[in-house]
Image (tube, rainbow, N blue to C red):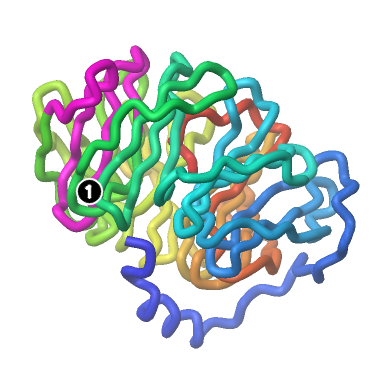
Amino acid sequence: MRNFFLSRAARRFAACVALAAGAAGIAPTLAHANNIIVLNSGEATLSLIDEATHQVVGTVPTGKEPHHLMTTPDNASLIVANSVSNNLMFVDPKTGKTQRWLENIEDPYQLGFSPDRKWFVTTGLRLDRIDIYGYDGHNFTLAKRLPLAVMPSHMAFTNDSKTVFITLQVSGELAAIDLPTQTVKWKMKVGKVPAGLWMTPGDKYLLVGMTGADYVAVVDWRNQKVVKTIVTGNGAHNFRSLDDGRHVAVSNRVASTISIIDEETLTNTGDITGLLPGPDDMELSADKRYLWVTFRFAKHVGVIDLTTHKLVQTILVGRSPHGIYFFDRAPVTAPNGA
């Protein structure tokens, strides 16, 4: 639910003094070799941040309400999903320069490729449906528009590409979709305002961020059962692996914290505090030392030192920053961090 906690977070932000370190003005050049790309969903733009200097070096217009993004499987393009404009924007992953547009993709809020790269799925948050496309490496062919209420949001795939799981924010459910037949296999209640999804190693459990609560639900999806809850912070929302084979970060949008979850013990190992309001999507630096995070309610991106768990820098971007992408990361073809 995109603006579910906006007013509350805005009040909190009014009482905060935003960190100014690293904030930069907008410059017109796109010439930098490697840029970090941030989607500003409230301004219909993307910000380009030079990876070496952490300075904003340009902005590029997008469609209305760009929220999530990911690369094509060949890493040749970065796809920006413009949910209100009903289209996909393909940009150069290095520079952010526009490559092409794909129209008539209705309400693409979240998006993802199946691990075998044969399927491409978008969730229609305001249309209460998901769209499933066949993918041949370049073309997207609509296979099924599947009604799915209420407010389908985030997704995760099984490694065999047979199932995609979708959170339903208003109905508080998790849905399992059979990709070969494009049918709903089952739906189950998981909690209040489920959002981000994360599959633990070996497809053992699904972790579900409860944006309407203060915990992550651990779901035994084969038996359709919540087996544990992990207390994190109010507004548990989205996930990002720390690429160590064991830990995943979850952003708590209302508490304005990030929790680190051990995927083996299914415990919260500690919280990162002292953040700006509305931490949301996250990305990891190539050396795995820094965790970058977008602050939805603060018009900033933050840089967290994972050795100290401290926010060490903030960078001014556009209104309601959401998705974030690093060119020097491996191709992002599944929506586990977007």
Please identify the quarter of the rendering in which residue 29 is found: bottom right
- The image shows residue 306, relative to residue 192, as above or below, that is above
Q: For this rendering, which residue is in front, 34 or 64?
A: 64
Please identify the quarter of the rendering in which residue 10 is found: bottom left
- Residue at screen point 84% across, 53% down: 53
Query: How many marks can you see?
Result: 1
Q: Which residues are magenta?
A: 156-185
Disc 1: CA contacts within 10 A as few (<14), some (14-19) or many (>=20):
many
- Residue at screen point 52% across, 53% down: 82
Task: Give SS at disc 1.
Answer: strand
Q: Is residue 265 visible?
A: no
Q: Position of residue 191 (x, y in %)?
A: 15, 51
The N terminus appears in which quarter of the rendering? Answer: bottom left
Q: Position of residue 288 (x, y in %)?
A: 63, 35
Q: Is residue 182 magenta?
A: yes
Q: Position of residue 247 (x, y in %)?
A: 44, 33
- Residue at screen point 69% across, 68% down: 316
Determine whether, in the image, residue 162 is placed left or right of residue 90: left
Q: Which residue is mark 1?
A: 168
Q: For this rendering, which residue is in front, 163 or 224?
A: 163
Q: Position of residue 189 (x, y in %)?
A: 10, 44
Q: Is residue 282 magenta?
A: no
Determine whether, in the image, residue 303 is placed left or right of residue 209: right
- The image shows residue 295, relative to residue 152, as above or below, that is below
- Residue at screen point 34% across, 48% down: 124
Q: Residue furthest front?
A: 104
Q: Is residue 25 visible?
A: yes
| Kind of residue at disc 1 | Leu
Determine whether, in the image, residue 207 is placed left or right of residue 228: right
